[in-house]
Amino acid sequence: GFSLQTGPLSQKFYQAMTSKLSSGGDDDDEMSRRSYQLLALDFTSREATRLACEQNGFILQDEYDNATKWGTVEQIQLIDPKGRSLGTPYDSLTDVVDSWKPGLGFHFVVKGVQAKGMDYNLQDVLSSLDPDGSWTQEAEEKGMALPTEELLTLKDLSNEINRRCEDTPVEASTEESVFVG
């Protein structure tokens, strides 16, 4: 919550959604404001989750047309501007909405996130493991084939590993049959 700036982000979402509301104080306006607060909490949670997924090598499978599909937000903990917890955690966004004010940050847990792993370029991964090129140079000197000569992505590497596992002979030899004279 704090590191992903949920407070300022939620305030921007809320302000964008409420900029057209009338300034009257009738019940319909109050219901609308509560609904917009709930939407701002949901949008902020989703955006923070998307960023967290990206930082961990995943892509969030957004379904903005169906708010229930992207994940379930639980354990919402309101935080002050310095990141300190305020009160006890809430079980859901609808529970916290009356205590939350736009701009107030929050931590949360989201479950059931639909995400998939990013496709990485195998050369980039190997370069990060061998930044000075010494491993690559040593492999070339010994005549070893490098994975990047035939495989371009981690998905290619995964497919090759699966192929090798599936193509492995299933019959096995025992010591007695191998060492027969």
Image (cartoon, rainbow, N blue to C red):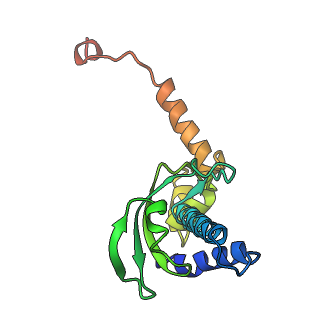
User: In the rendered view, would you say 105 is above or below 108?
Assistant: below
Image quarter where the C terminus lies is top left
Identify the residue shown where x is 74% and y is 77%. Answer: 22
Is 148 or 142 nearer to us in this picture? 148
Identify the residue shown where x is 48% and y is 62%. Answer: 93
User: In the rendered view, would you say 26 is above or below 38?
Assistant: below
Is 162 or 23 nearer to us in this picture? 23
Identify the residue shown where x is 51% and y is 54%. Answer: 142
Judged left or right of residue 175, residue 54 is: right
Q: Position of residue 17 (x, y in %)?
A: 70, 72
Is 121 or 101 nearer to us in this picture? 101
Q: Position of residue 10 (x, y in %)?
A: 59, 75
Q: Position of residue 96 (x, y in %)?
A: 44, 67
Q: Is residue 94 visible?
A: yes
User: In the rendered view, would you say 156 is above or below 47?
Assistant: above
Q: Residue furthest bottom?
A: 82
Judged left or right of residue 94, residue 171 is: left
In the figure, residue 29 lies in which quadrant?
bottom right
Q: Is residue 1 visible?
A: no
Judged left or right of residue 177, residue 163 is: right
Q: Position of residue 7 (x, y in %)?
A: 53, 79
In the figure, residue 109 lies in which quadrant?
bottom left
